[in-house]
Image (cartoon, rainbow, N blue to C red):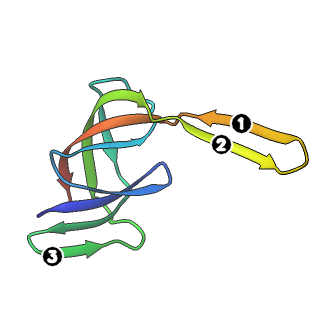
Amino acid sequence: MNYAVIKSGGKQHKVEEGEIISIEKLNAEEGDKVEFEEVLAIKSEGKLQVGSPVIDGAKVTGTVLSQEKDKKVVIIKMRRRQDYRSKQGHRQKLTKVKIDSIKI
C-alpha cells in the first residue's frame, strides 16, 4: 500500500492514488488539475520517507471533481436564568479532489 501525507487548509490528509478526498475549499474549477507540494511523508515499496517538515521535490497531483458544502453545524449558546440565547449555523465549503499521482 503506497500513500502520502499532505498538508492542505491547515490540516493533514493521508491519501492514496485513486482516492477521492474532501478538503477545505480551493480556488479551482471542476476538472482543473491541482498540485500539493507540502508533502509531509511518503510510503512506497515498504519504505517510509518523512520530511522535516516537508519532502523536497515531492508532489501529489489531483483533479477537482466538485465544489460542495458540508453538513450544517448548529451552534447554540445559552445562559440559564439570564434570558440569553444565541443560535448560529455554519456550512463549511469543501472541494472534492481525486488523487491522480504521488511523485517523489
Residue 97, picture quadrant? top left
Q: Residues within 10 Å of mark 1 (few under 14, many from 20)?
A: few
The residues bearing labels 3 and 2 have C-alpha atoms spaced at a distance of 44 Å
- Write the residue at 14% across / 62% down: 2
In the rendered view, would you say 59 is above or below 50?
Answer: above
Location of mark 3 (residue): 47
Give the quarter of the figure containing the C terminus. Answer: bottom left
92 or 60: nearer the eye? 92
On screen, residue 97 versus residue 45, left or right, reads right
The residues bearing labels 1 and 3 have C-alpha atoms spaced at a distance of 50 Å
Location of mark 2 (residue): 75
**What amino acid is labelled 3 in the image?**
Lys
From the top left corner, tell me how far across and down residue 4 is, in percent: 25, 60
Q: Point out the frontmost of discs 1 and 3.
A: 1
From the top left corner, tell me how far across and down residue 6 is, in percent: 35, 57
Q: Which mark is residue 34?
A: none
- Marks 1 & 2, CB-CB < 8 Å contact: yes
**Element type at mark 3:** strand
Give the quarter of the figure containing the N terminus. Answer: bottom left
Indicate which disc, 1 or 3, sits on the residue closer to the N terminus. 3
On screen, residue 87 versus residue 27, left or right, reads right
Indicate which disc, 1 or 2, sits on the residue closer to the N terminus. 2
- Write the residue at 46% across / 35% down: 71
**Element type at mark 2:** strand
**What amino acid is labelled 1 in the image?**
Lys
Q: Residues within 10 Å of mark 2 (few under 14, many from 20)?
A: few
Q: Which mark is residue 87?
A: 1
The residues bearing labels 1 and 2 have C-alpha atoms spaced at a distance of 6 Å
